[in-house]
Image (cartoon, helix red, strand yellow):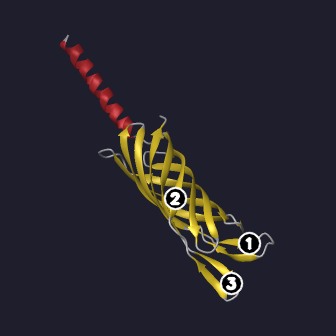
Amino acid sequence: MKKRVLLAACALLTACLAGNAAAEDLRGRIAITGRIGVTDPANGEKADTHGTLLVKTDAGIIGGGGLLFGVDDNIALDLEVTRSGYHTSGLGDAGVTDLAIGAQYRLPERQRWVPYAGAGIDVLINDVGNYVVDTVVGLHIKGGVDYMLMRQVALNAEVKGVEAFNADVRNFAGIKVGEFDPSNVSFTIGARYFFN
């Protein structure tokens, strides 16, 4: 009888330890993320009869969401869509939709904190005032941390920098009137929900 109780206790302990180890695994897990924050956009340029003028930008709001997929215990792929809006001093209100795909290197979970760093490619769809603006590509780097409230829910904070090509700004007659730089640095907070 004692052997059976001891074997049952060992089996229960093994199952508990395996469950805790599985909670830290990233491989095969899928998460959805939502975030909101502030963005500090780069300045642009506007053509003028006296030369080129600097177009200053104000800080703006950014928000969006995405998907995360764990490839192995430390690497995850992420796909994200964000939208930022802010005011420029010479071209009007600006908006940037950022379609980003990239990878993250995530450290193992320690005391519920999971720091990560990532990089990837962005497609930036721009609109500025009443002008026609090109869509451009760029690259991003980011760093952040997840705080695991439980196995399936985490709070998130992230800093992301995007460096992109300048987009030509044209009036409706097709004449170039300046250049818009969608490069930016943003800070966001949000949450992740892991489905498995």
SS category of the residue bearing label 3 = strand
SS category of the residue bearing label 1 = strand
Residue 173, position in %: x, y? 81, 72
Work out how far the residue at label 2 is from the one at label 1, CA to CA, in angstroms: 25 Å
- 59 relative to 105, above or below: below
Q: How many neighbours does mark 1 have within 10 angstroms: few (below 14), some (14-19), or many (20 or more)?
A: some
Left or right of residue 175, residue 1 in this image? left
The residue under the point 79% across, 72% down is: 174
The residue under the point 62% across, 78% down is: 45
| Amino acid identity at mark 1 | Arg
Residue labelled with disc 3: 48
Residue 116, position in %: x, y? 41, 54
Q: Residue 144: which quarter of the image?
A: bottom left
Q: How many neighbours does mark 2 have within 10 angstroms: few (below 14), some (14-19), or many (20 or more)?
A: some
The residue under the point 61% across, 61% down is: 95
Does the rendering let one see residue 163? yes
Q: 10 and 101: which one is in front?
A: 101
Residue found at the very far top of the displayed protein: 1
Mark 1 or 3: the one toward you: 3
Of callouts 2 and 3, the N-terminal one: 3
Residue labelled with disc 1: 170
Q: Residue 17: which quarter of the image?
A: top left
Q: Quadrant of the N terminus?
A: top left
Residue 61 disc label: 2
Residue 21, position in %: x, y? 35, 37
Residue 22, position in %: x, y? 38, 35
SS category of the residue bearing label 2 = strand
| Amino acid identity at mark 2 | Ile
Of callouts 1 and 3, the N-terminal one: 3
